[in-house]
Amino acid sequence: KGFQVSMSNLDTVALPYECLQSRIKIVADRIGKPLSLTEKVLYSHLDDPENQELKRGESYLRLRPDRVAMQDATAQMAMLQFISSGLSKVMVPSTIHCDHLIVAQSGGEEDLKKAKEINQEVYEFLQTAAAKYGVGFWKPGSGIIHQIILENYAFPGLLMIGTDSHTPNGGGLGGLCSNYDQLIELDLNTLEPHVNGPFTPDLSHPISKLGDNATKNNWPLEIKVCLIGSCTNSSYEDMSRCASIAKEALAHGRKSKIPFNVTPGSEQIRATIERDGIAQILRDFGGTVLANACGPCIGQWNRKDVKKGEKNTIVSSYNRNFTGRNDANPATHAFVTSPELTTALAIEGSLNFDPTVDSIKGSDGKEFKLNNPFGTELPAIGFDPGQNTYQAPPADGSSVNVVVDPNSKRLQLLEPFKAWNGKDLENLPILIKIKGRCTTDHISGAGLWLKYRGHLDNISNNMFLTATNSENNKMNKIKNQITGEWGAVPDTARDYEERGVSWVVFGDDNYGEGSSREHAALEPRHLGGVAIIVKSFARIHETNLKKQGVLALTFAKAQDYDKVQPTDKVSLVELNKFVPGKPLKCILSHTNGSKDEIMLNHTFNEQQIDWFKAGSALNRMKQIIAA
Ligand SMILES: O=C(O)C[C@@H]([C@@H](O)C(=O)O)[N+](=O)[O-]
Ligand code: SF4
């Protein structure tokens, strides 16, 4: 009792277990039955455990997170929004992690040096904003946010807000607990390794069928590059399992047939795999050790081996493989799988090779088969922390000067979005009616655009560039409904905006899947979009739209999507009756004079409707603070 342990060895704030347990007790007494792990983590962070409404799947919980973590591609916008809030310091321990902006080309040291030069302005902004507002700063080279969280910050029961969709990775240390909502039994002996792709992580192939499926679909069988690493596949164990395969190949005089890139998840992983000889084995196998960063996973890859438009296949252990995501080449067929399967496939460099059954010819001409990979979960003699790349926030950063050059191409201070004018939205043009998959990479691509993530007007030039227009099945070719001219999506949106004309977008299922990037919501809002109307939303993106004051609406009847003509004028009426749980009325006025009235569902609660009325959640927060 009374003995305090700090939340991490980099913070002074104590682990909050006493407070968490007292809140759980209050809720457990209210509910009167055992709680699942998720309920324990959430309810122990309730702002008002005595009175919070607790309807599973319905209630919006007001929560107090223990900490916040931001990666550098989203932290710029997060800190710009924080600066515009007028608050003087963060309320909970927070950190910024420089991991998304380092371009992979020749290898770790060289790439990191170049990144520090190229991104100097952005790193300087983040480093000074961190110091000024009390945020810890992990310098470029520290590693990927989620690996660092696992190494320094995650603890059982933690509730953390992260500006990246893989933040739940830290939940892996959630610890065991007594009550489950559902028990799913998986017989792992029946589960064979799978490889997913191309163009989506949802297209899954058992390794035994991969070659046939690739042949049937005319996907290139030859693998051009294999890449291991990423925020969720770059632990010490991952690397040591890959090294066990590399070592076996080397023992038979074989190595990777193709370029093989290795991304350590953090400086600690890099230093430890160097110390333990694992990095050298991977280099002997033909590997290039890249910087501790996201790199090619998010298109930070200065790829030289194929030309843009050239059809080719790559295999990685990354998390995503959407069109063009890794190298901005829409013809790159990217497949994702485990780090060890990626390593094994590199030996023969073909999708037609099944390392679980096929043998390999050694340099002595003799056939051999790979044994199952094995790894070491934790290094026997502990981790080598490597270089210290962490900057703790000073006790008082108020005098720190944060520079945002008004002529910068990469950073721009934010202007508040306008509040709703209290009127219905009448006869708006449709900017684009999107057909099929529309991920956040389609709405706001990464790759070369990542450099503009701190400049809302400049990054808006990538808006919807790779979304498919239902009218012509083309990307980035839409008709301006006022001038009749065909043009690029961002230019057309800017033309409407300059004319003071708001617009809407229609979309398909799981709209906005993938990344957390708020830019996919900020950009349409910035260029004059007022409503996104789709068959269904991806959860994170729907919330991002609401936060930015955009009406995130879904067809009450999915088939109403087919009633929408790209030339329609769209009205959203009776908005004065916009309340939780009540669908909104939409009138489609077709060019032939006929009209269709359809109903649109939404998931806005009272607080979020206030965000819409105020123009954004940030505007609403400032109203509350000022009141
Ligand atoms: O786009 C971003 O900056 C965040 C994004 C990125 O890490 C990604 O994997 O796409 N994510 O996953 O949330
Ligand atoms: S998914 Fe890729 S880009 Fe996103 S955080 Fe992980 S490594 Fe970085």
Image (cartoon, rainbow, N blue to C red):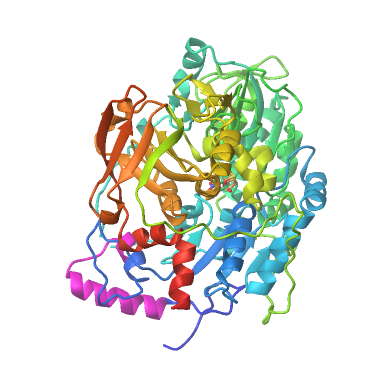
Question: Is-magenta flag for residue 189?
Answer: no
Foreground residue among 99 and 237: 99
Q: Is residue 447 left or right of residue 90?
A: right
Query: Can residue 318 be seen at all in this image of the molecule?
Result: no
Location of residue 379 in the rendering, given as x and y in whole percent from the top left corner: 62, 55
Vertical position of residue 296 compared to residue 11: above or below: above
Query: Can residue 233 be seen at all in this image of the molecule?
Result: yes
Magenta residues, start to end = 17-40
Vertical position of residue 390 compared to residue 198: above or below: below
Location of residue 16 in the rendering, given as x and y in whole percent from the top left corner: 44, 77
Q: Quadrant of residue 188?
A: top left
User: The C terminus lies in which quarter of the figure?
Assistant: bottom left
Q: Residue at x 45, y 18 (%)?
A: 209
Q: Main secondary structure of the magenta part?
A: helix
How many discs mark residues in the rendered view? 0
Question: Is-magenta flag for residue 25?
Answer: yes
Q: Residue at x 48, y 86 (%)?
A: 3
Location of residue 41 in the rendering, given as x and y in whole percent from the top left corner: 36, 65
Vertical position of residue 131 compared to residue 124: above or below: below
Q: Quadrant of residue 279?
A: top right
User: The N terminus lies in which quarter of the figure?
Assistant: bottom left
Foreground residue among 293 and 267: 293
Foreground residue among 296 and 485: 485
User: Looking at this rendering, what residue extends furthest in the left direction?
Assistant: 32
